[in-house]
Amino acid sequence: MPRALFIDDDEELLRANAQTLKLHGIVVDAHARARTALPALTRDFDGVVVSDIRMPDMDGLQLFQRLREIDPDIPVILITGHGDIATAVQCMRDGAYDFLAKPYSSDRLITAIMHAAEKRHLVLENRRLREAAFAVEADEVAFIGTTPAMQRIKQTLRHIADADVDVLVEGETGTGKEVVATALHRLSRRRHRALVAINCGALPESVIESELFGHEAGAFTGAQKKRIGRIEHASGGTLFLDEIESMPLAVQVKLLRVLESRQITPLGSNEVRNLNLRVVAATKEDLGSPAIRGKFREDLFYRLNVVTIRIPPLRERRDDIPLLFAHYLGHASRRFQRDIPEMPASIKQHVMTHDWPGNVRELAHFAERVVLGVLNTPAPEPASSSGAVSSLPERMERFEAQLIRDALQTHQGDIKATLESLGIPRKTFYDKLQRHGIDRQQYTQR
């Protein structure tokens, strides 16, 4: 519920305004003196300050300057007499949210408070997400997520970090499989040795065997000097094989032999070399599915499948999206040396309703475009990006919003008539206006 701290030395007017605001669902903290209100006005204050300018002891201008020192983002609405309008306009240039000239209507006051409260809510939410993102950076498992699924992954990583078992990481494109592999390496006793990453899908079949296993000089045409393979280079550390489902079958046979014996024989050599390594393999496919048997060996799958970690896509852990978005906003801000812009409601809605088929990678790129200012404000998405129709609750929300707009249009913004036609209480009506972002004033006959 929106909250307002109302200050006016005219106690009769103060009581009347407080009663009006309470009837419209606004929590009111009323004060006849500015100094008695100051203890409640901290950086964490979650409401709007409404203050008369002319008051004894500490007037509204002095209060406004004090609030600028406490938190310049606290929205302040100043109440002015005719002679104070120029002063109030200057205060708005200095950061005041709005001013109301006496006499003012209760509807004008309520609208100003509602809009200011929404702005304050967004400021505090963005601030909280930034702080949470910085806290994540200090976490020993730098893997962002507070949902139960992500907490289980963090717990698993800590539990198996020093157990030299091979790990299979499953997840869609962009979910952060390499981040999991990196976190596992950093938590293990192997963290002082190399983490060697190789993308099996990015290497041509003609060179992948040499890249993995190495070769002696003259082992094949063009092999002019000895080369240590990636597997041997990872000995003592961790070998990360990304997109392992793309590995050719002939190479899979040799990899299986390495995993079972922990030994390697480079191409063109008869020397068998011992290995001390952990293998983390990542795949976007379900390697246990019978449909993939034609391109991935079943015995290699079972050899890798000692511990399997599945990373859920973003659409399955939507509660983590705001934290991730804030993290990547901060990262982009530091990278491009630009301030994080204020987030309009349309971007917030897009972040929370988009399906993110590219997962974390897509979200990170979106955050970069937001910081760079090269993003057109996204329109609300009527359906998921996968092409599916909106859910029943989403359609009911849109239908309800349209009914309210139609009633306001029919009755030209008249509250009493609109309430009678809709058959809902006044407080419920204003709650719905705020939730659907409907401005009643635009339906009022001029």
Image: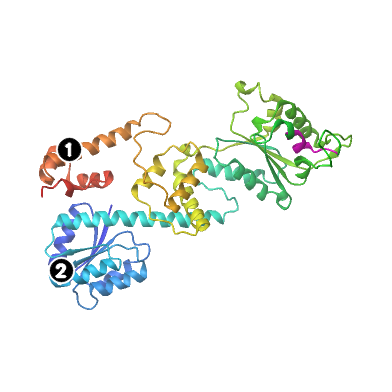
Query: Is residue 35 in view?
Result: no
User: x, y (%) of residue 356?
Assistant: 46, 38
- The percent position of residue 61, horizontal first and vertical second, equals 25, 73
Of mark 1 and mark 2, the one earlier in the sequence is 2
Which residue has dot 2 on it? Answer: 11
Q: Is residue 217 magenta?
A: no
- Picture coordinates of residue 190 (x, y %)? 72, 49
Residue 216 in which image quadrant: top right
Q: Nearer the viewer, residue 439 or 1?
A: 439
Q: Is residue 9 left or right of residue 366?
A: left
The image's mark for residue 192 is: none
Question: In the picture shown, does residue 286 fall above or below 121?
Answer: above
Q: Residue furthest bottom?
A: 57
Relative height, residue 29 to residue 111 (above, below):
below
What residue span does the magenta drawing correspond to?
Answer: 208-216
Q: In the image, is residue 272 above or below residue 346?
A: above
Relative placement, left or right, of 404 versus 240 is left
Q: Residue at x 50, y 40 (%)?
A: 359
Residue situated furthest right in the rendering: 270
Classed neighbour count for the residue bearing mark 1: other residues with Cα under 10 Å, few (<14), some (14–19), many (≥20) = some
* Mark number displayed over residue 406: 1
